Amino acid sequence: MGFRLPRIASTKTPDIPKGYFAVYVGESQKKRFVVPISYLNQPLFQNLLSQAEEEFGYHHPMGGITIPCSEETFIDLTSRLSV
């Protein structure tokens, strides 16, 4: 029995590969994830972006898109997008 790892990466380096973008996730401590641009076409991810817009508008305190959910929820959601 195996499991599939999501195609996202948690990173502290400023480099973002072509075809990816950074988001910040977490409730109190924000963690940076680099996700594929293809996620922008996914309804589940679009829902997260709508929540981010409602909570933060266009001002994101981390300088990038901040997703208002827990790390665990984000990883669970993006792992479903990777399948």
Image (cartoon, rainbow, N blue to C red):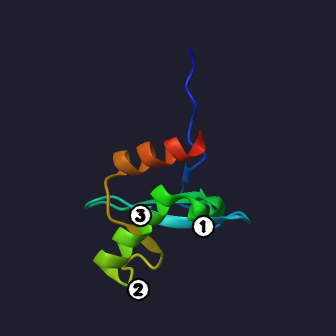
Residue 58 locus on image (x, y percent): 41, 86
Out of 49 and 70, give the one closest to the viewer: 49
Which mark, by number, is residue 58?
Answer: 2
Residue 27 locus on image (x, y percent): 27, 60
Out of 63 and 78, give the one closest to the viewer: 78
Q: Assess whether mark 3 and mark 2 are in contact (beta carbons under 8 angstroms).
A: no
Residue 31 found in image quarter = bottom left
Q: Give left or right: position of 23 versus 34.
A: left
Q: Earlier in the sequence, mark 1 or mark 3?
A: 1
**Residue 12 vertical placement versus 50 (above, below):** above
**Residue 78 vertical placement versus 14 (above, below):** above
Q: Assess whether mark 3 and mark 1 are in contact (beta carbons under 8 angstroms).
A: no
Q: Secondary structure at mark 1?
A: strand
Q: Quadrant of the C terminus?
A: top right
- Amino acid tagged 2: Tyr
Q: Earlier in the sequence, mark 2 or mark 3?
A: 3
Q: Secondary structure at mark 2?
A: loop
Q: Give left or right: position of 35 versus 44.
A: right
Q: Quadrant of the N terminus?
A: top right
**What residue is pinned by disc 3?**
47
- Amino acid tagged 3: Asn
Residue 17 locus on image (x, y percent): 71, 63
Q: Give left or right: position of 11 versus 55.
A: right
**What residue is pinned by disc 1?**
21
Judged from this view, the residue extending furthest toward the left is 28
**Residue 78 vertical placement versus 33 (above, below):** above
